[in-house]
Amino acid sequence: MKPGDIEARQILIGGQSLQVAIRHGAGNRPPLLLFNGIGANWELAKPFLEALTDTTAIIFDAPGVGGSPVPSLPYRPSTLARLAAGLVAALGHSEIDVAGVSWGGGVAQQFAHQYPKLCRRLVLAATSPGAIMVPAGPSVLWKMATPRRYTDKNYMNKVAPEIYGGDFRKNPSLIGAHASAMRGARNLGYFYQLLAMTGWTSLPWLWSLPQPTLILMGSDDPLVPPINGRILARLIPNAQLRMIDDGHLFMVTRPAETARFIEEFLANQENEPPPRILSAFAGGRPADAFSSGIKRPTSLSRGR
C-alpha cells in the first residue's frame, strides 16, 4: 500500500468481527484511531480520511453497524474501548492518537481514560460529556431515536438541516452526497449504541485526562450545542477549543480544513496548548472562553 491508500478488511478481535479501514500515511507519528458517530459506517468518514496528508488513520464500524456484525450481547463504552485496544495491539501499535466524533467522542474519552499510556493525544469533535450534557431540542432528539435517516434517504433529505445544521441548511446537495455513502445501521445495532451511552458520563474524571486535547465544535450544531464543548474545555486540564462556523457534520462538509486543524495539533511538539478558543472559518474575533458563565470548581484546578 502506498501513502493515501485506504485498505478495508475484516479483523476478528476477542470473538467480535470488525470491519476495519486503514488509511496509510507517510508520517512517523503514531496512527490516529477514529471513533465514528452513532449508526455511521466508516465510509461516511472517507472524505476526511482522504483529506489527511501524512497521517495513518484507523477506523472501524461499531458492532452492529456497517460491515461489523451485531454482537451477541449489548456493550458499554468501556467494552468498546477494550475492543479498540485489542485492535490496536493486533495491528502492532504501542501508542496512538485518538479522535471521536459525536457518539464516538464519548468512546474516545473513555478510551483516553481507560488507556492513558496507549493514548498520546485526544481529539473530540462535535461531542459532549455524555448523559450529563446540555441537550438538543426535543424535536431533534426524537429524530435521533431511530436509524431511519440511515435507511430512508428521502427522510434524511427532509430532516438533515434540522438535525445537523450548518452547511446542510445552506447547500442541500451536501445531504445527497452524505446519504450516498450510507450503508445502513441495523436496528438492533443502533439500539445497542443508544443503550451503550445510557447513563454514561465522563464528568467525574475529565479532570484526570493527561492527554493534550483538541476540541472541535460547530457553532450551528442543533444536535450537540456548542456549550458542551466549552464544558469539556473547561474540565480537561490540557485542552483547547476551536469553534468552527458550521454544523454537526463539519468533518463531512469541510474535511480539508478539519483534517488540517487536526494534523497541525497532532504534529505540535509543545506540551502547552494554544489559546483556549479559536475562531475557525468565520474570520471573526476569538470567542470568549468563559462567556457561558461556567465556573470551574476549585477542586478541579490544575494550576491554571
Image: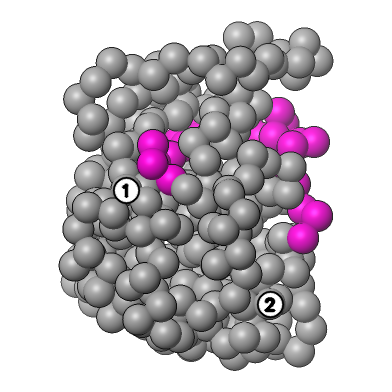
Q: Left or right: where does residue 178 sit relative to residue 16?
A: left
The image position of residue 269, as x and y in percent, is 37, 28
Q: Amino acid at mark 1?
A: Gly
- Provide the secondary structure element on which disc 1 rests: loop
Image quarter (top left, top right, bottom left or bottom right) of the N terminus: bottom left
Residue matched to label 2: 191
Identify the residue shown where x is 41% and y is 78%.
Answer: 155
The image position of residue 97, as x and y in percent, is 48, 49
Q: Is residue 250 above or below residue 69?
A: above
The 10 Å Cα crowd at callout 2, few under 14, some 14 to 19, many 20 or more, is some
Q: Is residue 144 above or below residue 293?
A: below
Residue in front for this viewpoint, 240 or 91: 240
Identify the residue shown where x is 57% and y is 58%.
Answer: 139
Q: Which residues are magenta?
A: 198-221
Identify the residue shown where x is 76% and y is 89%.
Answer: 72
Q: Is residue 50 above or below residue 106?
A: below
Tell me which corner region of the image, top left, top right, bottom left or bottom right, holds residue 218: top left
Residue in front for this viewpoint, 274 or 92: 274
The circle drawn on residue 166 is 1
What is the magenta segment's predominant secondary structure? loop
